[in-house]
Image (spheres, rainbow, N blue to C red):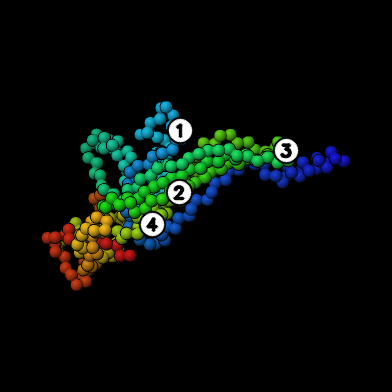
C-alpha cells in the first residue's frame, strides 16, 4: 500500500511541478516618453567615459583602455539614449579613429560641441549561486548583481547637474522534482542583462535633467533677404514651430559659489519656422519670420540675442 501511495505522489508531483528552466529578470523601469505628437528639441549629448571600477575580470593581462565591460556599458547607454529619440549623440570614445579615417578622405571631419557630457562607471559587479533543497524538490539559481554610477555635466559651466547610481539583477533558476527537471550551466548573458537593467533605471532621469533647461539657439543671419537661425530637422525643429527671441542677460559672478551666471534676458519678440535646410546636424539651419513684441533686432549685433524654446 505504501509503495502505491508513494508512486501516486510521484506522478502528481511530476505532473504539476515546474520542471522547466526559467529565467527571472527584474522588469526595467518604464520610461515616460513624450507624446508622439509633441515637439522634441534634441539636445547634443556625448558620453565621455564609461569605466569598469570593479575587480571583476581584471587579470594580469587586463587593459584599462580596452575593458570589454566598460565598453559594453557605454554601448548599452548609447542605445537606450538613442531609442528615446531626444538626443543627438556625439561620438567621443572612438573619436581618434574617426579623425584618422577622415584624414584619408577629401573632407575633414567637422566635430561639434556637446550641450551635456555623461561620465559613468560600473561600481559593483558580482555573481553567486544559491540553492534550496526540499524533500521532493530542489532549486538552483545563478544570480548576477551590478551597480552603475553616472554623472551628467553641463558643458557650458562644468557643473554636475545630476549624479545617481542604478542597480540591476538578473537571475536564472532551475527546478527539479525527484531528480527530474531542467539543468542550467554557466550563463554569461546574465552579466549583460544585469548591467542593462542598472543603466535602464538611470535613463529616464538623464532625459528629464537634459530637457529641464529650455533648448536654445542663435541667429546666423538677419537681413531683408533672409532671417536664419542655427538648428534644423535633426534637432526636431519643424515648420510652424514658434520660439521666443530674447536679449542676453548680464553676466555676473555669484559671490556665494564663485560661478559666473547669466541673468534672465528680456523677450523682445518671437520667430516662426518657415523652412529648414542643411545636410548635416552641424550645418543645419532654419528660415524664420520675426514678430516684434516691443523690440527690434540689431543686425550688427546678432550675438546679443538668443532664441529659446517656449516651455
Choose the circle earlier in sequence order: 1 or 4: 1
Q: Position of residue 307 (x, y in %)?
A: 24, 61
Q: Nearer the viewer, residue 271 or 145?
A: 145
Q: Residue furthest bottom?
A: 294
Q: Which residue is mark 4?
A: 208
Q: Position of residue 141 (x, y in %)?
A: 60, 40
Q: Quadrant of the C terminus?
A: bottom left
Tag in front: 1 or 4: 1
Q: Which residue is mark 1?
A: 57
Q: Which residue is mark 2?
A: 166
Q: Secondary structure at mark 3?
A: loop
Q: Nearer the viewer, residue 23 or 121?
A: 121
Please tell me the numbered disc located at residue 113: none
Q: Which residue is mark 3?
A: 178
Choose the circle earlier in sequence order: 4 or 3: 3
User: Horizontally, is 108 left or right of 46 in the view?
Assistant: left
Amino acid at each position: 500500500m505504501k509503495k502505491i501511495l508513494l508512486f501516486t505522489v510521484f506522478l502528481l508531483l511530476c505532473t504539476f511541478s515546474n520542471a522547466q528552466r526559467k529565467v527571472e529578470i527584474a522588469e526595467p523601469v518604464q520610461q515616460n516618453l513624450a507624446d508622439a505628437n509633441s515637439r522634441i528639441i534634441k539636445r547634443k549629448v556625448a558620453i565621455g567615459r564609461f569605466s569598469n571600477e570593479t575587480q571583476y575580470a581584471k587579470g594580469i593581462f587586463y587593459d584599462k583602455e580596452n575593458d570589454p565591460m566598460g565598453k559594453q556599458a557605454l554601448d548599452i547607454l548609447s542605445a537606450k539614449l538613442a531609442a528615446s529619440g531626444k538626443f543627438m549623440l556625439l561620438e567621443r570614445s572612438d573619436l581618434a579613429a574617426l579623425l584618422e579615417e577622415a584624414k584619408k578622405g577629401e573632407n575633414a571631419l567637422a566635430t561639434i560641441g556637446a550641450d551635456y557630457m555623461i561620465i559613468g562607471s560600473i561600481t559593483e559587479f558580482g555573481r553567486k549561486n544559491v540553492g534550496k533543497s526540499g524533500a521532493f524538490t530542489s532549486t538552483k539559481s545563478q544570480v548576477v548583481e551590478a551597480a552603475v554610477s553616472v554623472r551628467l555635466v553641463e558643458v557650458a559651466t562644468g557643473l554636475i547637474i545630476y549624479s545617481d547610481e542604478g542597480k540591476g539583477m538578473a537571475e536564472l533558476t532551475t527546478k527539479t522534482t525527484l531528480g527530474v527537471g531542467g539543468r542550467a550551466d554557466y550563463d554569461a548573458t546574465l552579466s549583460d542583462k544585469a548591467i542593462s537593467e542598472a543603466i535602464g533605471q538611470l535613463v529616464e532621469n538623464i532625459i528629464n535633467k537634459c530637457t529641464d533647461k529650455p533648448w536654445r539657439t542663435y541667429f546666423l543671419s538677419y537681413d531683408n533677404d533672409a532671417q536664419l537661425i542655427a538648428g534644423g530637422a535633426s534637432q526636431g525643429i519643424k515648420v510652424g514651430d514658434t520660439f521666443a527671441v530674447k536679449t542676453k542677460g548680464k553676466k555676473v559672478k555669484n559671490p556665494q559659489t564663485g560661478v559666473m551666471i547669466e541673468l534672465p534676458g528680456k523677450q523682445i519678440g518671437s520667430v516662426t519656422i518657415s523652412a529648414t535646410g542643411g545636410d548635416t546636424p552641424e550645418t543645419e539651419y532654419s528660415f524664420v519670420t520675426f514678430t516684434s513684441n516691443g523690440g527690434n533686432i540689431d543686425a550688427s549685433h546678432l550675438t546679443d540675442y538668443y532664441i529659446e524654446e517656449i516651455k
